[in-house]
Image (cartoon, rainbow, N blue to C red):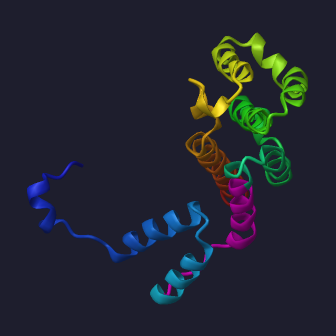
């Protein structure tokens, strides 16, 4: 149902719906302390088992954001063991963060070894070929931060991947919760 913006003042808004939207945002973004304050102020019920999963997701997010993709992968596999197996694109993106960090640190030999060990099989899939070429091109530059592919080394790139990872983990956890509560 679309409402004409001129009639917004006539639309009734349920306070519980607003509280649920805010709570969902806080849980999704791992704002634990703010969520607890919000719950205390509104008198809402605290979501079951939110703290442990939220803290783990927050750690995983921060590791990916900081460029420590291997630790993010390790913790993701502990929390949601088959997520990265099922989401190969996300797995590739995390591995590419690690490759980029090796290049940025001028560890070119180590980056090549890592690419051969972990990224080679992605080259057999067409949708990864161009991405792989862009990452490998970083090795050709003495200062990869100044190359045409510098964005692959930037915070925005890592943040996009960290957010995708957080959404995927949260989605998997919600699917698990729904399956255990509702049996589907």
Residue under the point 67% across and 29% down: 144
Residue 10: image location, x then y, percent: 13, 67
Position of residue 166 relative to residue 107, above or below, is below
User: In this orientation, which residue lies closer to the viewer: 63 or 91?
Assistant: 63
Residue 18 quadrant: bottom left
The image shows a total of numbered marks equal to 0
Residue 117: image location, x then y, percent: 91, 24
Does the rendering let one see residue 184? no
Q: Is residue 104 left or right of residue 10?
A: right
Outermost residue on the front side: it is: 142
Does the rendering let one see residue 150? yes
Magenta-span inclusion, residue 56? yes
Residue 130 quadrant: top right
Magenta-span inclusion, residue 11? no
Name the main secondary structure of what is drawn in magenta.
helix
User: In this orientation, which residue lies closer to the viewer: 30 or 155?
Assistant: 155
Outermost residue on the left side: it is: 6
Residue 165: image location, x then y, percent: 66, 46
Highlighted range, magenta: 43-62
Residue under the point 72% across and 18% down: 140
Q: Is residue 50 left or right of residue 4?
A: right
Position of residue 167 relative to residue 22, above or below, is above
Residue 116 quadrant: top right
Residue under the point 75% across and 69% down: 52
């Amino acid at each position: 149902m679309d409402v004409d913006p001129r009639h917004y003042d006539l639309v009734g808004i349920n306070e519980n719906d607003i509280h649920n939207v805010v709570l969902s945002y806080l849980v999704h973004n791992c704002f634990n302390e703010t969520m607890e304050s919000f719950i205390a102020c509104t008198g809402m019920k605290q979501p079951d088992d939110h703290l442990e999963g939220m803290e783990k997701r927050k750690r995983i997010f921060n590791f990916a954001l900081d460029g420590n993709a291997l630790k993010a992968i390790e913790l993701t596999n502990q929390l949601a063991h088959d997520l990265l197996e099922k989401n190969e694109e996300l797995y590739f993106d995390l591995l590419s963060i690690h490759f980029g960090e090796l290049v940025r640190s001028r560890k070119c030999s180590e980056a090549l070894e890592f690419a051969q060990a972990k990224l080679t099989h992605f080259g057999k899939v067409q949708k990864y070929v161009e991405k792989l070429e862009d990452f490998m091109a970083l090795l050709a530059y003495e200062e990869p931060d100044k190359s045409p592919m510098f964005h692959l080394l930037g915070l925005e790139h890592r943040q996009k991947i960290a957010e995708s990872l957080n959404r995927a983990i949260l989605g998997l956890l919600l699917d698990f919760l729904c399956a255990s509560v509702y049996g589907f």
